[in-house]
Image (cartoon, grey):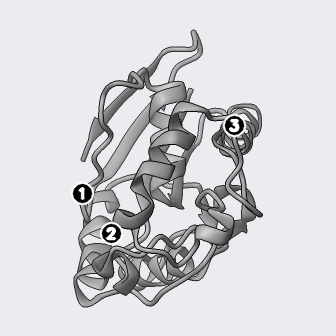
Amino acid sequence: MLEVLLLRHGQTEANLEGVVQGHGDSPLSCDGIAACYSMAEKIRGFNISKVYCSDIGRARRTMELIAEKLPYLPRARYLAELREIDFGRYTGRLKDEIMPLILRHKADTGKSYPDGESGDDLTRRTERFINMRLKRDNGATILVITHYGVIETILRRFAGCSASQPVTIGIDDVFHLVFESAGKVDFRLL
């Protein structure tokens, strides 16, 4: 069994402006900072043995703020495989401007963004991360701080969310997933 507490980085200034960040970065907003403290409270009662975090600044800052409230957490391992999808040349553009392109890429997951990644690339690295955790962290409770695309991929690939079901992640949502030995995954929103 593996228990995973999965959360998205705090809201950023770019999120507020509707800017696609991908591998780019932006400071956390005031509401994003407050949400980090709220997420810390939601995970306070768990016996977390390992912490994995995207190496992008907004996720790192989220980890720092959570650690302020939960100083007993193990030191985080910062991993590139937990990064958001690389939107390549579309990084920094307004989401509303490129939404038709994003939807085409979601429909054709093998198609890469120019100078970026494909949905299949994101799925492979996300699956690699989870499968490694299932092998190496069996029996543990881990905290994973990442991005919307990684969370969406985990929920679709491992927790049974269908492609037609929208994945919505609130500003301070924490997903609690339990990977059981028979391959079953139970999840709930904290």
Residue ID for mark 2: 40
Residue ID for mark 1: 170
Q: What is the x, y in percent for residue 167?
A: 32, 40
Q: Nearer the viewer, residue 49 or 114?
A: 114
Q: Is residue 81 visible?
A: yes
Of the two numbered discs 2 and 1 on the same chain, state the one appearing first in sequence: 2
Q: Is residue 29 left or right of residue 74?
A: left
Of the two numbered discs 3 and 1 on the same chain, state the one appearing first in sequence: 3
Q: Residue furthest top?
A: 182
For the residue labelled by badge 3, is the local secondary structure a helix, a strand or a loop? Answer: helix
**Quick check: marks 2 and 3 in contact, CB under 8 Å?**
no
Q: What is the x, y in percent for residue 42?
A: 26, 59
Residue ID for mark 3: 120
Q: Is residue 106 above or below residue 178?
A: below
Q: What is the x, y in percent for residue 182?
A: 57, 9
Q: Residue at x 42, y 20 (%)?
A: 160
Q: What is the x, y in percent for residue 9?
A: 43, 69
Q: Is residue 55 left or right of residue 60?
A: right
Q: Residue at x 69, y 69 (%)?
A: 78
Q: Is residue 47 visible?
A: no
Of the two numbered discs 2 and 3 on the same chain, state the one appearing first in sequence: 2
**Quick check: marks 2 and 1 in contact, CB under 8 Å?**
no
Give the Cα separation between the discs numbered 3 and 1. Answer: 25 Å
Give the Cα separation between the discs numbered 2 and 1. Answer: 15 Å
Q: Residue at x 31, y 84 (%)?
A: 33
Residue kind at label 3, given as amino acid type: Asp
Residue kind at label 2, given as amino acid type: Ala
